[in-house]
Amino acid sequence: MQPIVDLQGKVGLITGIANEKSISTGVAEACAQAGARLVITYQNERTRAFIEPVVHRLGVEDVYLLDATRPDTQQEVFERIRARFGKLDFAVHSMAFAKRDDLHGRVVDTSADGFALAMDVSTHSFIRLARMCEPLMELAGGGSLVTMTYLGSEKVIPNYGMMGLCKAALEAATRYLAAELGPRNIRVNAVSPGPLMTRAASGIAGFDGLMAAAVDRAPMHRLVTPEDIGALTAFLVSDAGRLVTGGVHFLDAGYNIMA
């Protein structure tokens, strides 16, 4: 397959791969095809087996544990990146979690503990990632951070509950990080795909109907794929996107513009 953009010589960190249908799988494939050397993380030993086909297919040698609830694992990942590559050119954040009751229940009923956990894993983990990336990206002469969001950040999506608040905060963090890291030539962007069936989406009640509505209402009458998300993300982390920062970039066949 013809590379989308040129990422030769760049080192990238990809988080959030759960299996071969994950958003991050499409991102990793696009970046690898464009020539990037990749570091891939997994959440725990149980999930490691599910990402092995992706790791094997892409020939990735650097596969590390990164549990968003354990800061020591994140520290170790970045120590290994520094020792192995001495720099980091881009990083993709695709981590989110909310307790099932908080995801399906009313926001007004969210517990303080549930709120804190969802915000920590879904939003503050991106801020922590950016802080760890900063010195390694400075060694590379600059870099690019990309996180994954969703329309539920600004519109009320049934059964999306607490995650809508997390994504709204994540998008605000994207703008503030872009402003703070811009002087160091580090760009920060969010990609907002339309609905697609992933392991995370399978936990949202009525998601099949949401996808059907997206196909019906979107001007292009299509669902986004992990490959589509990979193409846009590879552009954003490449030199072709060198002045693109602070934005939320919709990738949903135009669904977000419809009333």
Image (spheres, helix red, strand yellow):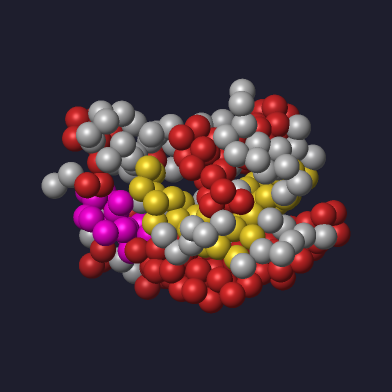
User: Looking at this view, is 226 or 233 the one in front?
Assistant: 233
Which quadrant of the figure contains the N terminus? Answer: top right
**What's the residue at 67%, 28% (across, down)?**
53
Q: Is residue 208 above or below residue 137?
A: above
Q: How many marks?
A: 0
Q: Is residue 130 above or below residue 160?
A: below
The magenta stretch is: 151-167
**What's the residue at 61%, 26% (across, down)?**
2
**Is 259 situated left or right of 161 in this image?**
left
Does residue 101 show up? no
- Judged from this view, the residue extending furthest toward the left is 259
- Judged from this view, the residue extending furthest toward the right is 83
Expressed as whole percent of the image width and height from the top left, the position of residue 111 reads 34, 69
Expressed as whole percent of the image width and height from the top left, the position of residue 141 reads 71, 64
User: Looking at this view, is 205 or 181 the one in front?
Assistant: 181
**What's the residue at 39%, 56% (across, down)?**
248
99 drawn magenta: no
Expressed as whole percent of the image width and height from the top left, the position of residue 218 reads 23, 35
User: Looking at this view, is 239 or 160 the one in front?
Assistant: 239
- Judged from this view, the residue extending furthest toward the top is 1
Does residue 187 show up? yes
Expressed as whole percent of the image width and height from the top left, the position of residue 97 reads 46, 55
**Is 206 situated left or right of 129 in this image?**
left
160 drawn magenta: yes
- Snapshot quadrant of residue 20: top right
**What's the residue at 56%, 40% (across, down)?**
27
- Snapshot quadrant of residue 171: bottom left
Q: Is residue 16 above or below residue 26?
A: below
User: Looking at this view, is 1 or 71 the one in front?
Assistant: 1
